[in-house]
Amino acid sequence: MLTVMIENMQCAGCAAGVKKAVNGVDTNAAITIDLATKRVDIASLTDNHKIIDAIKSAGYAAVVV
């Protein structure tokens, strides 16, 4: 399980963008997003660095918690 905080995720559109970025590297990832706390939990078999890179490439500042 990978947990990241995304400070610049402020709306449902941002949450959808983060989900799309993660699904771009793992279509089977289980993603739970809490917009109020800006926390994203990701269950995936894909390397965490690839997931974080995908989120950052989509324009979001992901920090591992």
Image (tube, rainbow, N blue to C red):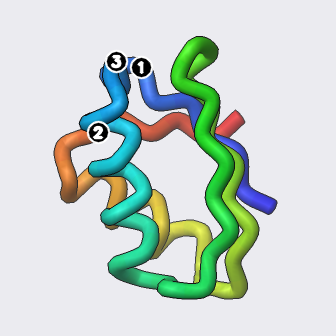
Give the CA separation, mark 3 to mark 2.
Answer: 11 Å
> Circle 1 sits on which residue?
7
Q: Which mark is residue 60?
A: 2
The percent coordinates of residue 53 (x first, y second) are 35, 63
Residue 21 lies, with reference to residue 38, above or below; the image says: below
Give the CA separation, mark 1 to mark 3.
Answer: 8 Å
Mark 1 packing: few (<14 Cα in 10 Å), some, or many (20+)? some
Identity of the residue drawn at 52% across and 35% down: 63
The percent coordinates of residue 40 (x first, y second) are 61, 41
Mark 2 element type = loop
Q: Nearer the viewer, residue 61 or 38?
A: 38
The percent coordinates of residue 45 (x first, y second) are 70, 86
> Circle 3 sits on which residue?
10
Depth check, mark 3 against mark 2: the one in front is: 3
Q: Are marks 3 and 2 in contact (CB under 8 Å)?
A: no
Identity of the residue drawn at 35% across and 55% down: 55
| Amino acid type, callout 1 | Glu
